[in-house]
Amino acid sequence: MSRRVVITSIGVFSSLGFSIEQIVDNLKNGRVAFERPSFDDSVVTCPIKNFNIKDFINPFKDRRYLNRGAQFCVVSAIEAVKNAGISNKLLSNAGLFIGAGPNLDMGSEFPEVRAGEIDREDLKALWILRFLPNTAASAIARLTGIHGENLTITTACAASLQAIGEAFRKIKYGHLDLAFAGGGDSRLSRGGILAYKKAQALYTGNSDPAKASRPFDINRNGFVPGEGGAFFLLEEMDHAQRRGGTIYGEICGFGNSIDGYNMTAPNPDGRWGEKAVLAALNEAGMSPSEIDVVSAHGTGTSLNDDMEANLIDRVYGDNTPFVIAPKSWIGHISAACGAVELAITLACMRNNYLPEIRNLEEPCHSKINFVRNGQEHSVNTVMAENFGFGGQNCALIISSHAKTQRTQRKT
């Protein structure tokens, strides 16, 4: 027997703000944080400025073992726990599901490497913790008292959305009553920029930094890396209602798949990405016409955007929903992109607002209903999509609180 799963708390750290109110305000006023890093003026990044983990976790001696991406993971999880307002007993039984990526800041971690030798007097005894993907989970558990089932997922750009989907399934089928799920990441270091630059995935050029991220535009030129984190409390609906929890939305369906095509590029025909989308629709018991908005992966790379636009066209046909692209506002947050984009989506659903796709001047597909201007609009059901390196595909369907209430009255 399956159960209904709702989102009852949000913790988010993004370049658009640290709350859904700040996010919506910055979306409506067009405020973004794109800039050129000091060490490479040929690329653009979207950093979170003036972030210091000591402002949010103090004291905690083991924070030295958290790389910057893990720091965003930990602080957003702690914020979600704080906002949830649940007892220590409930926390102890809660699950913990994390999407994480690799620490590519090798230059800062090992500045004196010669002939492969990294040992030196000032090397931390537990330096390996800064490179293990599950370090964030350990820190979160210690700081919050979460002790239930846990899973750290590293499926590239699909990781945090998949973590949320896996938590959803655990609750839906009765293994847990509640779970915290999300992720955090940052690839803005020299090593991170070098890795993506070598892979020819990054935007490079001398245009205005604010114009660099342009998903679905014919003249797009690669993605802009960002950073941040977001976490959510997922909860069985009756459990949430009994304790008087705030319901931000209901998760209705989840799908994922793998291309098996290329180590970095998506399968051009998008058939396996489409499989994930259709699986989410099938689990939700919905037809494509019931989706109001697609929150697209929309990286701004040539291959991803063409694949995704054609996928949307095939799935929805002439009934194309509105399509938004959060990366045009925050850059690409790698393993954490799905979580942060879900926070943005929930903020927009709650405020009946659709943000424009920034810098979309010449759409790459004429039949897609891309949002070209920010607008007030009721948003009931959203399909969130993420497609990662290695052909990792993930899709999640979320319905608004308003629709959740209507459905509940019918049952």
Image (spheres, helix red, strand yellow):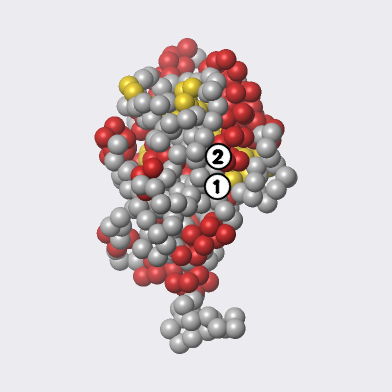
Type of amino acid under label 1: Cys
Task: Identify the image quadrant of the N terminus.
Answer: top right
Q: Residue furthest bottom?
A: 121
Residue at (55%, 21%) from the top-left corner? 367
Which residue does the numbered mark 2 point to in the structure image? 386
Neighbourhood count class around disc 2 (C-alpha, 10 Å): few under 14, some 14–19, many 20 upward = many
Quarter where residue 275 is shown: top right
Residue 214 vertical position relative to residue 192 in the rendered view, above or below: above
Asked which quadrant contains residue 386, the reply is top right
Q: Which residue is mark 1?
A: 157
Q: Identify the residue at image location x=54%, y=43%.
A: 301
Residue at far right of view: 260
- Where is residue 181 shown, x and y percent of the image? 48, 44
Q: Is residue 56 left or right of residue 104?
A: left
In the displayed structure image, the side of residue 306 where residue 235 appears, left or right: left
Q: 198 or 177, which is in the foreground?
A: 198
Q: Secondary structure at mark 2?
A: strand
Residue type, mark 2 in image: Asn
Report if residue 41 is visible in the image. yes
**Is residue 83 shown left or right of residue 100?**
left
Identify the image quadrant of residue 174: top right
Q: Is residue 54 above or below residue 128?
A: above
